[in-house]
Image (cartoon, rainbow, N blue to C red):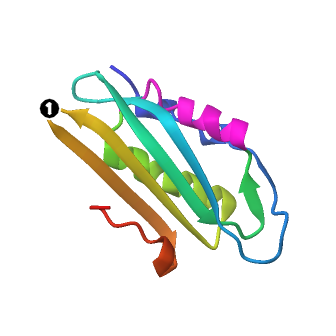
Amino acid sequence: MPDARLVDPSLLEFFDSPSDSPFVIEHVSDEFTSVCPKTGHPDFGRVILRYQPAAVCVELKSLKMYYQSFRNAGIFYEAVTNRMRDDLAHAMSPTWIQVITDWKGRGGIRSKIIATAGDVPACWVTKLDA
């Protein structure tokens, strides 16, 4: 059975923020996959990572490799989203961070999970029904 311990945050790399002024970064991955820990079936989703950097930004190739480390991990949607938020918030200490996962339907049910840290400005707050 797949193992959630396969997720590897050590793959993440960072670079210094190019500005001391506040700005927002949004990265979208339309090809995220993980594995259902109950059935072993693949789960397919879209990940939106949105944050205001404080000192560092995540490097994109490393982010892709980190996302790919979930590929064979048996992990629920909710755990994926919260794990990403926790790993990235811990590593970057952004002013705020928001991770949104939007999962393809299975059995007629679609899911969207939102995990945040810090004070997300109202203009960036994502509603579950949006």
**Magenta-drawn stretch contains 63:** yes
Q: Is residue 11 found left or right of 104 in the rendered image?
A: right
Q: What residue span does the magenta drawing correspond to?
A: 60-74
The residue lying at 40 percent from left, 48 percent from top is: 101
Q: Secondary structure at mark 1?
A: loop
Q: From this viewpoint, which residue is outermost toward the left?
A: 107
Position of the N terminus by quadrant: top left
Residue 33 is drawn in which quadrant?
Answer: top left
Q: Return the residue at label 1.
A: 107
The residue lying at 78 percent from left, 67 percent from top is: 55
Q: Position of residue 16 (x, y in %)?
A: 84, 59
Residue 80 is drawn in which quadrant?
Answer: top left
Q: Position of residue 45 (x, y in %)?
A: 39, 37
Q: State whether residue 42 is above or below residue 8.
A: above
Q: Is residue 116 found left or right of 61 in the rendered image?
A: left
**Prevailing SS of the magenta stretch:** helix
User: In the image shown, does 4 or 44 lie closer to the viewer?
Assistant: 44
Looking at the rendered structure, the kind of residue marked 1 is: Gly
Pointer 1 local density, CA inside 10 Å: few below 14, some 14–19, many at least 20 = few
Position of the C terminus by quadrant: bottom left
The residue lying at 47 percent from left, 45 percent from top is: 47
Q: Position of residue 84 (x, y in %)?
A: 50, 49
Q: Position of residue 20 (x, y in %)?
A: 82, 75
Q: Is residue 30 found left or right of 105 in the rendered image?
A: right
Q: State whether residue 117 is above or below residue 114.
A: below
Question: Total marks drawn?
Answer: 1
**Magenta-drawn stretch contains 61:** yes
